[in-house]
Every structure is written in C-alpha cells, then in structure tokens.
Amino acid sequence: MSDTFFTASPHWTWWIIFYFFIGGMAGTAFMLASLMDWGSRQSSVVSRQQVMSHESRVARTAAPLVRYGYYLAFVGVCVSGFLLTIDLTRPLRFWHMLIENHTGQPMFKAWEPMSVGSWALVIFGLFSFLTTLSVLREDWPRLGLLRSAPVRFLRRPGPGVVLAILGTIAGLFIAGYTGVLLAVTNRPVWADSHLLGLLFLVSGTSSGASALVLLAVRRRVAEPSTVGWLVWFDCNVLRLELLVLIAFLISLGSVARVYLSWWGVLLLLGVVGLGIVLPLREEHRPHTPRQVARTASLVLLGGFLLRMVVLLSSEQIHVLGSGVTGP
C-alpha cells in the first residue's frame, strides 16, 4: 500500500453510487440522442434529393428513440440532483452550493470540485430540459404550450444544433467529472490514478448506449438497423472500457493489492465477466430482441458494479497516521 497521507473516508452512502451511475448514463444518453437527432435532420435533407442510403435510413427511423434519449437524459439529471441533495447533511440547504447565503448572489468556486459539479449539473439540466421540451410535442400533440412559438424555435436547425452541442459537452463533463471528483478526495485507490475520470466516462458511455438499446427493444421504437448500430457502438466502447480498466489497475501500482479480496472477485466476475466479456461474446451471434435486452441489462449491471467496487473498496481502507492499511 502507498504510505502517502490520506484523509478519512467521506463515508458516502449508496445515494452517491446511484448518482454516479445515473449521472454518467444520462450524460452519454444525451450525446447519443443528439447524434441520432443530427442524423435524422441530415436524412431529411437527403430524402428531399431522393437519395436514401443505408445510413440515412438508420438516422431517419431513429426519431422516436431520439425522444427517449432526451427523456432519459432529463429524468436522469433530475434524479441525480435529488440523490446528491438527500446525501447532504442538511438537504434543505442544497441551494447553498449555488447561491451565497448572505448576498443571494450566484456562488461559483472554480477550485472546489463540488461547486463545479453542482453548476455542471444545473447547466446540463437546463439543456436536457430544453431539448426535451423541443421534442415533447410529438408525444403530446394536444398540449397547447408545446405549440407555442418559443418551443417551435427550439426545434429549428440553428437552436437545435446549439443545444445539442452544448448539452453534449455538459453531459460528457458530468459523466467524467464523477471520476475526477473521487481523484481529488485524497483517498486510497481514488487518488492513486489519473485514469479514473476516463474510466467513468467510457463506462458511462457504454451504460448510456445500453440504456437506449433496452428502451428501443422494450418500447419497440426503433427498427433493427438502428438497434444494430447502437449495439455495434456499445461493443466498441466496451472494448475501450476493458483497456482503460486494465490501464487503471496497472496505474494503481502496489495499491491494486486492495483487489486481492472479494472486491477483486466482484470486479473480475461482475464488471469484467458479466458486464464486458459476456456482452462482447454475444456481438456476432444471432439474437432475439429478448437476448439483446438481456445483454444490455448486463452492461448496465457492470457499469453499476464498477462504481460500487471503486467507491466501497476505498471506504474499507483505514488510515493509521501516515500509513494505509486494509480492512
């Protein structure tokens, strides 16, 4: 173990584990929905020219799934904010993280990760709300508010692209920020690698893709070609996730010995085995919608277990003076 001084454990509860998982999934689901939305817009232009390639057919038929992706992002960021709030010692004072108590002025501390993360969550929530509002009319056509000029303006090409780009940046920041937040807490495992932010970002991307696959299959809102593209994308991200996970463990050095325990067993069997290797084995096999849904569920389980293992394995390490011991 490293003999560097570490602070005491923050004793985060399960609320934070769910926050890390749902926040990463919501941020990357927004990115994928934006990509499919852009493809859908482009295919509309191509169809006017009577050119219908395979790629444009995939994009054109992805419109219902685009809406579900934006819905998932908005609900996810709302749930993330709620989980982060109830984990506070005094939840009713959550607004103190954004507003100065005595002046009522916005409070932003660039040097404080919690302040940066809180504002990033608010900004991402704003963009996900606006994009959800822009597509909600297709599912709620009778709602008068959704036919108003400001809402129609959001769906125009210019504002739509701006929202997609800025929302994607904010969403990806949220997905990777959770790992960076751990790295600056000066705790064993968390502070011993610079790859934790990248690992959580890649894992969040695979979780976001799998969540959309699961929605597409369960709700039957996309053609097989669209689902096939998402599965292909997810498998490539899973390969990258496996490489980053291996690099993360190597970068820990001697601290990686903490995983010579049942935490390591859970990491190997749950995260790597069920969440990465098994879904990759199913990539080129014929499968039914039920099998696709089951594989996507395994990826989501692996993403959740990864965050659980990383957080709780460090929680089990005790600090004795300037030394670090196991549980």
Image (cartoon, rainbow, N blue to C red):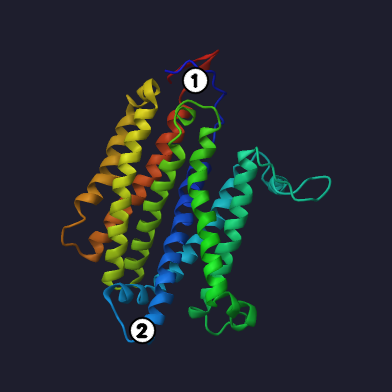
303 on left or right of 5:
left
Q: Nearer the viewer, residue 3 or 212?
A: 3
- Residue 44 vertical position relative to residue 286 in the rendered view, above or below: below
| Image position of 188 with respect to 274: above or below | above
Say which of 237 and 298 sits in front.
Answer: 237
The x and y percentages for residue 186 are 54, 27
Q: CA distance from mark 2 to mark 1?
A: 62 Å
Q: Position of residue 47 (x, y in %)?
A: 36, 84
Residue in the picture at 68% in, 47% down: 94
Position of the N terminus, as image quadrant, is: top left
Disc 1 crowd rating (10 Å Cα; few below 14, some 14-19, many 20+) is: some
Q: Residue at x 51, y 27 (%)?
A: 187
What amino acid does circle 1 point to?
A: His
Q: Which mark is residue 8?
A: none
Q: Quadrant of residue 155?
A: bottom right
What residue is shown at x 65% (from left), y 37% (from top)?
111
Residue 318, labelled with which disc? 1
In this view of the protein, can residue 74 be seen by the observer?
A: no
Q: Secondary structure at mark 1?
A: strand
**Residue assigned mark 2:** 47
Q: What percent of the width, then of the height, locates residue 10?
A: 57, 31
